[in-house]
Amino acid sequence: MNSFYHSTRSKLDSVTSKQAILRGIAPDGGLYVADWLGQTKMDLAAVCAQGFHQTARQVLGILLPDYAEDELAACVEAAYGSQWDTPAVTPVTPLGADWLLELYHGPTSAFKDVALQMLPQLMSVARAGDGRDVMIVTATSGDTGKAALDGFAGVPHTGVTVFYPEGKVSDVQHLQMATQAGDNVAVCAIRGNFDDAQSEVKSIFADEALAQRLAASGVALSSANSINVGRLAPQVTYYFDAYAQLERAGVVKLGEKVTFCVPTGNFGDVLAGYYAKLLGLPVARLVVASNKNDVLTDFITTGTYDRRRDFAKTISPSMDILVSSNLERLLYYMSDGDCELVASLMADLGEKGFYQVPEGLLAKIQEVFACGRADDDATRAEIASTWNELGALIDPHTAVAKSVLDAVPADGTVRVCLSTASPYKFSSDVLAALGQDTSGMSGFACMDALEKATGTTAPAQLSGLRDLPVLHKDVCDRAKMGAFVESSCARVFL
Ligand SMILES: *Cc1c(COP(=O)(O)O)cnc(C)c1O
């Protein structure tokens, strides 16, 4: 069996999983996919009898076949150690008749830690056979940036440059990034929205002249966005581990199907659920939950992906996305590996701003994926009712998913709502949703008030931010992002 990855847009260029992780995105702009995905299944009975670490090693062993077992074991130990505030890593807790999969117990209080504590480990192993220094370049809608900074800070022979849309992340998210210490980190706000930042990062990766200049000084660029295989693969673990927790608690019987509802932005998290299904996890439905930026709801309903719409700034900013990059991978797998189709759909998206998938393809997607949207009012109402009626304090992203899940007709399956951030990352919006007047209050005043109102405690890494110095104040236009990357490479590596 071949163990290579290739682009969603062409099968000509095969790379190992290590190379795919170092490169991030394929040279033709496509995303790395593997035709053998799903041929090897996880042993579900074994998964149910073991913990998160063991499952992580097995999932990664299947998805990243050129890593040695002992390499992966060391990566897993380093990524899922005492930086997590619970040994369960991603615990499942009750949520009324449903279940909450808590993915925010890592060092930056967002689910991105699951992948971004692991990616630097995988990259270090991969670059050991390569010799070059690696500069990670990442666009963030809020949470990825800090999670990448935390994961890569201080990792030898790597650097990390983060761009975020100025004024479009929460106070706490902003401070999390602006206070990041480390000699190998760079942070810059850009004038524009997340999609501007993300498309410019894609152009930076496609800039051959820049790549050649950097290569001359022994530096290669790579991505920590969820388009990187090394970010996607670790996320598959918690779908299996959640299932194991439910099986051990007697909630599901071995083999019984489970529904997962996922607050979705770039389609990485929910795609990992689809990978889990391909690896043998009994999944009934994957429910794609969107906020007011509901381009995915329309797509899954009609088969037309149309980005020509206004970008809405919402209280769930990590889902404020009009181009969900990882959807390209789903199109590849659902079309049975039709690179030509994927390439032409992506060309349509680039040139016309929309594409329409063939009917048969839409039907296949709808067999697995359900969808729904929740605007800010529905999100706030959900935060309030979940706290008042179920005693669970959830963040706005999780509330979008919970609201959508409530609207999906119950089909008798056990249902898991993915919880992607600590409510304290968004204290002001959560407090306001609980009915308090927050006008004139700082992010930290809201954090304190939220503790008082609910009797819960903010994670120490968030409440401690108020005492840290702001180290990063750069702001630039989209056109200057490439130059910023080049200067941070010079500063970090030369
Ligand atoms: C990134 C993020 C999401 C969206 O995840 P995708 O993989 O981009 O779909 C949802 N919630 C939070 C809190 C996030 O940080």
Image (cartoon, rainbow, N blue to C red):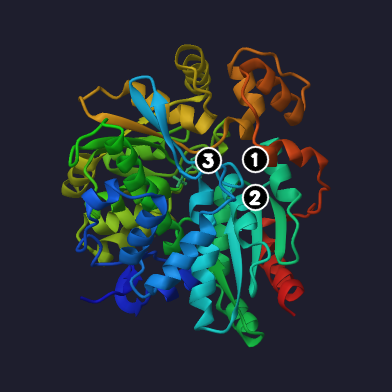
Q: Earlier in the sequence, mark 1 or mark 3?
A: 3
Residue 408 falls in image quadrant: top left
| Amino acid type of the residue that numbered disc 2 sits on in the rendered structure | Tyr
| Amino acid type of the residue that numbered disc 1 sits on in the rendered structure | Val
Label 2 Cα crowd, 10 Å radius (few <14 / some 14-19 / many 20+): many
Q: CA distance from mark 1 to mark 2?
A: 8 Å
Q: Is residue 268 left or right of residue 1?
A: right
Circle 3 — which element? loop
Q: Is residue 147 left or right of residue 490?
A: left
Give residue 474's position: percent from left, percent from top.
78, 55
Observer-side mark, 1 or 3, equals 3
Q: Earlier in the sequence, mark 3 or mark 2?
A: 3
Q: Nearer the viewer, residue 172 or 347?
A: 172
Disc marking residue 164: 2
Q: Earlier in the sequence, mark 1 or mark 2?
A: 2
Give residue 75's position: percent from left, percent from top.
49, 65
Q: Is residue 166 visible?
A: no
Circle 2 — which element? strand
Which quadrant of the figure contains the C terminus?
A: bottom right
Q: Are marks 1 and 3 in contact (CB under 8 Å)?
A: no
| Amino acid type of the residue that numbered disc 3 sits on in the rendered structure | Tyr
Q: CA distance from mark 3 to mark 2?
A: 21 Å
Give residue 459's position: percent from left, percent from top.
64, 36
Q: Are marks 1 and 2 in contact (CB under 8 Å)?
A: yes
Q: Nearer the viewer, residue 33 or 463?
A: 463
Circle 1 — which element? loop
Give residue 273's position: percent from left, percent from top.
33, 47
The residue pinned by badge 3 equals: 104
The residue pinned by badge 1 equals: 169
